[in-house]
Amino acid sequence: MGAETPPWTSRRISLDWWFFFYAGLWVLSSLIVGVGVGLILRRRAAAEGEPVAAPTEQDRQATLKSLAEVLNAVERLTSEVGTHDTEIRAVGKHVGELKVTGELEDIQQAILGHIESVLESNQKLTDELVVAHYQIESQAQELDRTRREARMDALSGVGNRKAFDETIQWLITTWKRDHEPFVLILADVDRFKWVNDTHGHQAGDSVLVQMGSLLKLCVRGGDIVTRYGGDEFAILLPRTELAAGNQVAARVRAQIWRSSFHMGDRGEQGVISLSVGVASAQEGDTIETLIARADKALYKAKEAGRNRVYCLPADQREPQLVELAGAS
């Protein structure tokens, strides 16, 4: 009788076969990942060549959201490919260290060859993901820059009327839903026509540029300064009660009154004042009723002599004086 095969030898061969089976699964799954991502990237590259219509604001928002989701997916996939690579290398190392002969040695070499091929494919995939990550980030930044420019007043450097309209719509909606308070400040440059008539329209433009810069310095980072039209500015203060809004308005008026404005190329300097009207969102308000209250308070500030702040609470019929020149 021939020599019996030791039991441990049968178990070793069985374990080796199971090991090769699982190694094969790793290779297959990696190939599937690579093919899937490759298809996604090719579709994306093809889509980039297609002409697209000018996006609306809703389109921009949806696109930014989609780009952010894709960017997160790319980052996750890049991390998973790196983890997968580490695991496949560990499998390859273990397969290479197995002491096998004959048919198993042929299988061993075939699997090692496939593993090397998968690692090379994964490296190419990682490189493509890095490029895709950069391109997606660039597209998101460009889209965000375009959006900001579309809402920026080119002269004064603050938000334009479109920015005001969109922001107040969002704030009034939030107020109706959550009763989150906010304040509207309307500020009009006093005697702006005199500046234009006396010093020229370039001087008037210079005043508006300086006004925009000063107004931004008077508010918090989350507040919104816009040019409402002509020589009138609007400031929106989210999460702010009327009393706090009055304080901001008084600070704005005082800062402008203390500042010296460059009036022309010959070094002329002048003092500018603001008339200011303040109103806060109240129960039942619409955008129109809120603006009307702030505008009525602004008109009262003008009528009372300019360079002062008035507010119109919802429970009052007439605007109330908040601050006038000399009170700061």
Image (tube, rainbow, N blue to C red):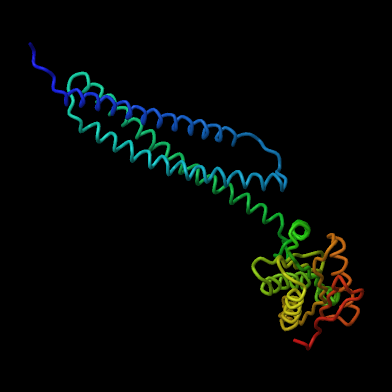
* Viewer-closest of 137 and 177: 177
Where does the image place residue 219, in percent across and percent down from the top left?
A: 68, 72
- The answer to whether residue 256 of the structure is visible from this angle is yes
Q: Is residue 60 above or below residue 231?
A: above
Where does the image place residue 52, in percent across and percent down from the top left?
A: 67, 38
Q: Is residue 281 left or right of residue 255?
A: right
**Of all residues shown, which one is farthest toward the top?**
1
* Viewer-closest of 68 and 326: 68
Q: Is residue 6 left or right of residue 273?
A: left
* Viewer-closest of 302 and 318: 318
Q: Is residue 160 left or right of residue 13?
A: right
Where does the image place residue 276, in percent across and percent down from the top left?
A: 81, 75
- The answer to whether residue 164 of the structure is visible from this angle is no
Toward which corner of the image does residue 266 lie, by quadrant?
bottom right
Task: Please tell me which residue is depicted at 44% across the width and 29% down the height of the picture.
Answer: 32
Toward which corner of the image does residue 246 lie, by quadrant?
bottom right
* Viewer-closest of 159 and 281: 281
Quadrant of the image containing the N terminus: top left
Q: Is residue 273 above or below residue 97?
A: below
Quadrant of the image containing the C terminus: bottom right
Q: Is residue 245 above or below residue 133?
A: below
